[in-house]
Amino acid sequence: MHPIDGRFCFTQDLLINIYMYKPLLALVAAALLFASCHHTAPQEPIRLQGQAQGTFYSIVYYDSLSRDFQPQIDSILHAFDQVASLWVDSSELQRLNRNETDVLSPMIADLFEKSSDICRYTDSAFNIFIGPLVTAWGFSFKEREELSPQRIAQLMTYTHGRWQINQNAQGQKILAKEYPQMQADFNAIAQGYTVDRIAQWLSRQGIQNYLVDVGGEVIARGAKPDGTPWKVGIERPAEDKDAAPQVELTIALRDCSVVTSGSYRKYYEKDGTRYSHTIDPATGHPVSHTLLSVSVIDPDSWRADALATAFMVMGLDKALQFIESHPQNPAVFFIYHQDGQYKTLATPEFSKLIIQ
Ligand code: AMP
Ligand code: MG
């Protein structure tokens, strides 16, 4: 493990990032934090961790009954993969994408309905049928294609194809797509959606104070035993995707989710150009503006996740216009480059949550 700054360890409950050894960091941070305040804590935190969705998860909760929920959490994660993972060949999503079925289970119908709302809300900056473009640009299982403008235009037709959810005679929900080549990709909300499901499940068990992190998408409920809110660190984007994570700032999070999307961890370089895994549905190309990361706060993690991706697509100026023109403004934090300089910008609602 890379060296960890002592101050960081004692002041953070979690560092948000999308990097492999983040959960180790978070765990060390949490361990030190709880060790340091042991004398005031009425009960020990229970910590669960593991791998899911190509990343790590980490969960901290307080339970007066000291129940170990590891098997149940693993089965929630497994169930999600069986439905909506692109990496499980037999998943419902893959079967829909291959047009082997058009019937939607309740979970995938919910994912499509939520995605449809955000697609409309963001004027298609977030677009769930981005799949063929993501694959063609080399961010899925296949090598990047040699992409002509005609090929990109063709793939964009599939991304912007019409689709709707109908009901069949048996009352089942059915996906109707304009083109059979249309392929859905839930990667931009999968982790946020999973965080919500875990959080809802914990709440149903009567757990009131917990922090759930799947791949850097975090939800906090309640508070720590001394009544102080959970603290979450926002990562400073690194120049190099393999660099050790550093904290840009720390926020207090109570009954809310914070999700970060960035262009600095998942990208590849070809002929001196950096290609980000966020694709602009309006151009069919990976985004290439100077926004390094966007962190969004919302009561629902899936929504924060979807909006963070949409803001990465829009870029700083359009995202700011969007936030100003929507009355229910989310709290957002941007990290970007301008004139070669590293800059940050927090909306007023976000600024209120910064503790250091
Ligand atoms: P995130 O890290 O949450 O921003 O999600 C990025 C992932 O979402 C990418 O790896 C793609 O699989 C997918 N994606 C890329 N561009 C878009 C987009 N414009 N709308 C929806 N999903 C996208
Ligand atoms: Mg997202």
Image: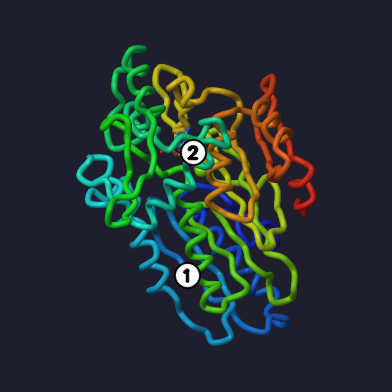
- The residue to which callout 1 is attached is 48
Residue most toward the bottom? 65
Seen in the image, is 79 located left or right of residue 353?
left
- Whether residue 183 is visible here, answered yes or no, is yes
Mark 1 surroundings: few (<14), some (14-19) or many (≥20) residues within 10 A: some
Residue type at numbered disc 1: Leu
Mark 2 surroundings: few (<14), some (14-19) or many (≥20) residues within 10 A: many
Seen in the image, is 32 located left or right of residue 19?
right
**Residue 219, image x, y percentages:** 59, 59
- The residue to which callout 2 is attached is 265
**Residue at left offset 51%, top offset 36%:** 119
Give residue 178's quadrant in the image.
top left
- Dot 1: element: strand
Residue most toward the top? 149
Compared to residue 274, the image places residue 99 above or below, namely: below
CB at disc 2 and ligand 1 closer than 8 Å: no
Seen in the image, is 339 located left or right of residue 305?
right
Distance from label 1 to label 2 (Cα)? 25 Å
- Tell me which numbered mark, 1 or 2, is placed earlier along the sequence: 1
